Image (tube, coloured by chain):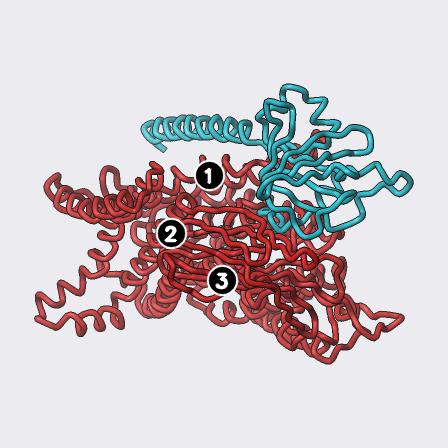
Amino acid sequence: MAAFAAFLKKRADLTTIAVRAAYGFSLAMFLANVWMVAALLRNDFSISYVAQVGSISLPTWVKVVSLWSSLEGSILFWGGVLAIYIAVATRSLNDSHGWARPAAIGSWLVCATFFAFLIAGPAQPFGTVVDVPTDGPGPNPLLQNHVLMAIHPPFLYGGYVGMTIPFGLALAALITGRLSPTLLGTLRTSMLAPWTFLTVAVVLGGWWAYEVLGWGGYWAWDPVENASLLPWLTGTAAVHSAILTERRGVLKGWTLSLVIASFLLTILGTFMTRSGIFNSVHAFSQSEIGPTILAFLAGATIASVLLLGFRVDLLKPDNELDRGASRDTAFLAQNLLFVLFTFTVLIGTVFPLIVEAVRKVQMSVGRPYFDRMTIPIGAFILFVMGVGPALPWGSSSREELKRRLLPPMGLGLAFLLAALAYGIRTPWTLITLFFGGYTAWVTIFEALRPVRTRMKFRTDGFLKAFAQDLFGPGRRRMAAYVAHAGAVTAFIAIAVSSTSGRSLEQNLKQGESMTLGRYSLTFEGIEHAQEPNRTSVIARIGVTKDGKDLGALRPMMNQYATRRESIGTPDVRTGLVEDLYLSAMNIDQETGTVGLLVLINPLVSWLWIATVIMAIGGLMALFSSARVGQTIEASPKLQAEPVR
Amino acid sequence: MSSNDGKKRVALALGACAFAGTLLYFVVGGIGNNLVYYWGPTEVLAAGPKARGASIRLGGLVEAGSIKKGEGSNMSFTVTDGKKSFPVRCTSVPPQMFREGIGVVVEGTVAGDGVFESHRLMVSHGNEYRAPNDPAAINLKKLMDSTEGLASSDKK
């Protein structure tokens, strides 16, 4: 790895070497991944990783996803994703980035070298096996249990690994002491790709828990979940403060700090999930990889803090930050709230580790802490998301403020009344719904503002004006409001589903029934299913709602050939209003009884829908700012977005 | 830098400190009130009245002959660590593997009548928590670590 050559910058020929090194790393790492997948498909048990997670009986898709189903392979996969990111990012940099180009490539390659070192050292997927086995155990059954296993990790890696790119760019800005508009544009774009991936990944993790684990919820403030959420929080803050930096030329150091924090939190998250300090399906086995990652985290943190400390003064603000009731203030409030959120979750997650290390006592921070701390912060974020876009940039008159801020109250009150009518009495849920309605109004109203202007002045039809805005200069603006619309939906779905559900646990003999709400459930009988890698015992539960037959749900227990314990799979009847969730805790075939956990979860499906909307928003922003980046390169003075 | 700038900086730093202090106060208070202790029967007994109302994860083996099924999903049994034992009342439907002699972790608190009241029952999947030379003794940490119940919300 001749990565360090890149640091001897200020010489054009060395930049070329750095670029070549970046492409070389990418190609090598990519080929290593392809090689491993091929070995998994060929059941080549002479390779240690295949012997560890492979199995002849596995379906082909499980064989492919086995690449990331265990420690060594997942590090290799990390390298593979990093390879793709570095190749694309290296391509997107050019001479207009000046000396930031070799500095950024150098930073990426240092990270790349670290992961190459991990693969060659502590985690060795390509080791040779002396006594070649005829078959392997296959991956953890919890991971074979659902197709999400094929989707969630690539998205998470897309988010986690992708943070390396903006991190490198931020370091480059600090090293060169200059954050040019070109560099800022690239930084923002490079933030949006991992942000979009991470948004989807965080929720997919929750969806996986919901569909596979069978306890009935999607979020438990588990350290593993928190690890995925933390960089998302700082990432979201960074995407927003970058807008303020771009528009006003302020908060340069702050934006860079958030970008750097996002990267460091991904490494912390990797350490927490992979090192085995928290027991989970993500902590594959106790290994020496933990200290190595911790050392890298420490090194990266020290380097970042030193660079920030010594160089941040070079990034002079071009303007003063606006005070009073303006959109600038709202951006600032948003940033502070997200950072507050991050700290709350981070401290709650890390606290048990510190206590265990210092006092050798095992404990955890209970869910009530996270709920109590984050619900008010979340509600305020929703409030700012409503009020912020309603406010104009810069100062404005009292009448102007009234005209902008009062009308959205209507939809807020409507949502509030609807919630009261539905029987919701939890104060924070009601507050969230009021803010949600308010913000929904503002989001739609502001998203369509240019469309209305177009219709008024050009007398275009709505569809034509809308299409022109979407495919014209307004896409980035529209993208922001699409993402906001998704966020509002998510807020409401989370608030209602987490406070207004009902649940019941009961043992049923064959033929017996139970009722929960308007549902009546009858245990009709036991079925069996046989697949190559598992046998399943299924409880057939007949479901009626208000006497209307809805067919049967089939929660089951799966026994994997290679594992001792059996693992349940819940069955969910998904609806737009509520989900009916059945989980078999145990199925006793001798006495013909089933222990059932039944939940009614309102609005959960809207969380999945909301995530799709947010991801679409992220993608729209990504593709519009890629284009904006090009126009900025053409004429550096050009402002990216029309005001308001 | 003008003196005005300096004053601004001092004000900003003071504001940031006040903000951080308030935050720390709430966070520490919040954590302190919501800790979940990972204890065996010995530790619960040692804690005495302090255990009442505290969130506890009680780990141990299900004592032979102690399981009594009640109405619905109600059930009672005794958890032991080889030295001391503690009575448990449980409202959750037990997982498939639940039986006498297996390692379990129950989550809940000690009720007024001195019985551990649990709403969540998890069964250990491994065997590594058993001490090699004494089958009745257990390694509490390993037991907690190897517990991956179906009703578990935080063992993913």
Instruction: Please tell me whether residue A349 is drawn above or below residue A641 in the rendered image.
Output: above
Circle 3 Cα neighbour tier, 10 Å, few/some/many (<14 / 14–19 / ≥20):
some
Helix or strand or loop: what does disc 2 sit on?
Answer: helix
Circle 2 Cα neighbour tier, 10 Å, few/some/many (<14 / 14–19 / ≥20):
many
Helix or strand or loop: what does disc 1 sit on?
Answer: helix
Which residue sits at x=79%, y=39%? B64
For label 3, the residue is A542
Instruction: Please tell me whether residue A585 is drawn above or below residue A420 in the rendered image.
Output: below
Residue type beneath disc 3: Gly
Residue type beneath disc 1: Asp
Distance between the Cα atoms at labels 1 and 2?
15 Å
- Dots 3 and 2 on the same chain: yes
Circle 1 Cα neighbour tier, 10 Å, few/some/many (<14 / 14–19 / ≥20):
few
Give the position of the C terminus of chain A as an image quadrant. Answer: bottom left
Q: In the image, residue B100 lies at what x, y percent?
A: 76, 43
Q: Which of marks 1 and 3 is nearer the N terminus?
A: 1
- Chain that is cyan in the image: B
Q: Colour of chain A?
A: red
Q: In the image, residue A111 lies at what x, y percent?
A: 62, 58
For label 2, the residue is A493
Q: In the image, residue A324 lies at what x, y percent?
A: 23, 37
Q: Earlier in the sequence, mark 1 or mark 2?
A: 1
Q: Which of marks 3 and 2 is nearer the N terminus?
A: 2
For label 1, the residue is A371
Whether residues under marks 1 and 2 lie with C-beta atoms below 8 angstroms apart, the answer is no
